[in-house]
């Protein structure tokens, strides 16, 4: 079965704009008619849906926020009759009510097509064996990775999360060639494979990792230990799930599927639309989704749209790797700090590994930041700490305390690694 189901050449330059505007002209009136949430939202903004005909017109449409999705729990944003819904997925709900996302059969099919494109972009073929470690169930990751691989024709090894012993056994016995995981679990598996001396017994050649921000230092370590090329995949439950963007072998950014999704970048403080190349918050409009389409959804992910064509030759447009989430941003002594900036300091500092923890405290009204960083074996902790502290000051502009700890001493995770511990609101 074809993966693209449309010609990529149609989705570059002016052609993609014409395609997106045609879909936008269909989407807004459909939402006005079928979604009580959006009908009310557009009426309150004084917008006639027939007036939204161009990408410039879209700037007048109000944003949709995650708080609004939570307020619509469980199915307040559903835009089709219930009998057309074949599946739901859900966000974790760790920071409030979960977001329930209904999918029609067409939504499920399109998602699998987009995901299969991601696999193909990473060089995966029907001859590969794909070991899937993300979770199944209400979370989108496991079933998304599986559906995309099956559409591509690859063999799926649907392990699900955890049980590292069984993961390694199946990786060896099934001769898995592709590993899908969070970057944190990929690192845990890579270290365990190295510790057990299994490198010569595995057959991995490719890793597709996502669900959290991970830096170049972590990427290099995973690739070295496993002997693979890795690819950063992007997505979020509210849209489809993972599979809406992925980096290619050129590794200069992530290609996103502009025939189904409209990306904008805004200033997160003012909401003003920013030009290509400018860093800001990613906003997504789902052009072809049926169950719960979204107009100008604020993802809270900080990135930029890359205006230059990709060296790989694929015409689908590029976004940069996500620097961090606006709600992951640390405000420290008047400076806004994102996890991606810490990753940059790691890259610039010899003698450190990829793993770190940030501990924020407050005493007598003064904020302090301690960064614990794992050192490379053989490095001199005191010298590395001095250099890392200097680089934080140079590249981020703040003075922090640094502690270099032995390699492997910071906790590993089978899911997402918690890197920031903010104790400033704790009772003194």
Image (cartoon, grey):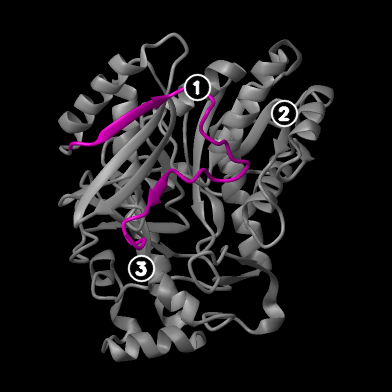
> Quadrant of the image for the C terminus?
bottom left
Q: Is residue 359 above or below residue 24?
A: above
The residues bearing labels 2 and 3 have C-alpha atoms spaced at a distance of 37 Å
Residue at 61%, 64% (x, y): give it: 107
Residue 188: image location, x then y, percent: 61, 31
Q: Is residue 123 left or right of residue 305?
A: right
The residues bearing labels 3 and 1 have C-alpha atoms spaced at a distance of 43 Å
On the image, numbered disc 3 is attached to which residue? 296
Highlighted range, magenta: 399-428
User: Which dot marks residue 407?
Assistant: 1
Residue at 36%, 86% (x, y): give it: 41
Sequence-wise first label, 1 or 2: 2
On the image, numbered disc 2 is attached to which residue? 128
User: Can residue 5 be seen in this snapshot?
Assistant: no
In front: label 1 or label 2 = 1
User: Which dot marks residue 271?
Assistant: none
Residue at 31%, 17% (x, y): give it: 382
Tell me, yes or no, whether the highlighted magenta stretch contains residue 229. no
Circle 3 — which element? Answer: loop
Residue at 18%, 66% (x, y): give it: 270
Q: Is residue 168 above or below residue 181?
A: above
Question: In the depicted view, which residue is nearer to us: 170 or 232?
Answer: 170
Residue 297: image location, x then y, percent: 39, 67
């Amino acid at each position: 079965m074809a993966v693209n189901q449309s010609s990529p050449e149609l989705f570059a330059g002016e052609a993609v704009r014409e395609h997106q505007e045609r879909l936008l002209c269909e989407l807004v009136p459909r939402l006005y008619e079928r979604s009580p949430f959006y009908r009310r939202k557009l009426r309150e903004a004084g917008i006639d849906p027939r007036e939204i005909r161009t990408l410039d017109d879209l700037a007048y449409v109000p944003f949709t926020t995650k708080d609004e999705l939570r307020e619509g729990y469980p199915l307040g944003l559903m835009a089709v009759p219930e009998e057309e819904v074949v599946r739901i997925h859900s966000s974790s709900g760790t920071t409030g009510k979960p977001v329930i996302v209904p999918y029609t059969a067409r939504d499920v099919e399109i998602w699998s097509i987009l995901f299969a494109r991601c696999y193909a972009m990473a060089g995966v073929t029907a001859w590969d064996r794909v070991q899937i470690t993300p979770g199944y169930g209400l979370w989108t990751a496991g079933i998304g990775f599986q559906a995309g691989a099956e559409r591509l024709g690859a063999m799926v090894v649907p392990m699900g999360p955890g049980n590292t012993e069984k993961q390694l056994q199946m990786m060896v016995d099934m001769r898995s060639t592709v590993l899908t995981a969070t970057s944190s679990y990929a690192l845990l598996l890579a270290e365990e494979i190295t510790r057990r001396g299994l490198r010569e017994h595995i057959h991995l050649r490719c890793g597709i990792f996502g669900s959290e921000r991970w830096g170049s230092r972590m990427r290099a370590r995973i690739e070295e230990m496993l002997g693979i090329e890795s690819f950063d995949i992007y997505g979020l439950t509210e849209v489809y799930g993972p599979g809406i963007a992925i980096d290619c072998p050129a590794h200069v950014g992530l290609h996103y599927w502009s025939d189904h999704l409209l990306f904008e970048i805004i200033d997160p403080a003012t909401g003003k639309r920013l030009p290509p190349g400018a860093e800001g918050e990613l906003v997504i409009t789902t052009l072809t989704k049926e169950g719960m389409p979204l107009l100008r959804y604020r993802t809270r992910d900080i990135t930029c749209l890359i205006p230059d064509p990709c060296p790989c030759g694929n015409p689908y447009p590029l976004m940069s790797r996500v620097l961090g989430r606006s709600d992951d941003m640390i405000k420290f002594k008047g400076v806004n700090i994102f996890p991606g900036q810490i990753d940059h300091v790691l890259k610039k500092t010899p003698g450190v590994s990829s793993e770190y923890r940030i501990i924020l405290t407050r005493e007598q009204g003064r904020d302090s930041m301690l960064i614990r960083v794992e050192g490379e074996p053989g490095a001199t902790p005191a010298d590395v700490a001095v250099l890392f502290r200097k680089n934080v000051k140079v590249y981020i502009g703040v003075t922090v305390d640094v502690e270099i700890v032995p390699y492997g001493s910071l906790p590993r995770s089978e899911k997402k690694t918690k890197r920031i511990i903010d104790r400033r609101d704790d009772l003194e």
